[in-house]
Image (cartoon, rainbow, N blue to C red):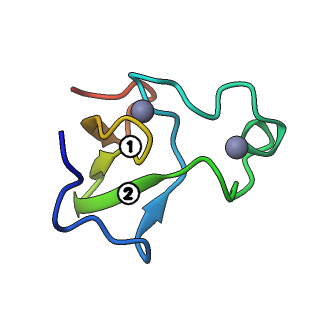
Amino acid sequence: MPLDPTADLGRRAWFTCPRCGHGKSCLTCENGRTCGDHWQYLLANKASLLHLQCPECTHLWSHDTRKSTPVR
Ligand SMILES: [Zn+2]
Ligand SMILES: [Zn+2]
């Protein structure tokens, strides 16, 4: 899957990808800091619902920030 045309390096969000899980065993990520290696493209957001794309595996998913688990 190609990167979404709206993917912008200037709009990023720090979440773990539900598919490849990149950033899982990274100390910077675990400390909740803005890691320079592990982030997701923030394609769009509607209220608390974020649309994200992983730069590693290009997986697309939505994440509701009101819930703890990602919505697919
Ligand atoms: Zn991924
Ligand atoms: Zn990291």
Of residues 22 and 32, the one nearer the viewer is 22
Of residues 1 and 16, the one nearer the viewer is 1
Query: In the rendered image, which residue does mark 2 sit on?
Result: 41
* Amino acid residing under circle 1: Cys
Of residues 68 and 19, the one nearer the viewer is 19
Can residue 60 be seen in the rendering of this structure? yes
The vertical placement of 35 against 16, above or below, is below
Q: Along the polypeptide, which appears first: circle 2 or circle 1?
A: 2
The vertical placement of 26 against 43, above or below, is above
Can residue 46 be seen in the rendering of this structure? no
Query: In the rendered image, which residue does mark 1 sit on?
Result: 54
Q: Is residue 22 left or right of residue 56?
A: right
**Quadrant hosting ligand 2:** top right
* Residue name at image x 44 percent, y 40 percent: 56
* Residue name at image x 26 percent, y 28 percent: 71
The quadrant in which residue 62 appears is top left
Of residues 1 and 12, the one nearer the viewer is 1
CB of mark 2 within 8 Å of CB of mark 1?
yes
Q: Is residue 7 left or right of residue 40?
A: left
Q: Secondary structure at mark 1?
A: loop
The vertical placement of 39 against 42, above or below, is above
* Amino acid residing under circle 2: Tyr
User: Disc 1, ligand 1: is the CB inside 8 Å?
Assistant: yes
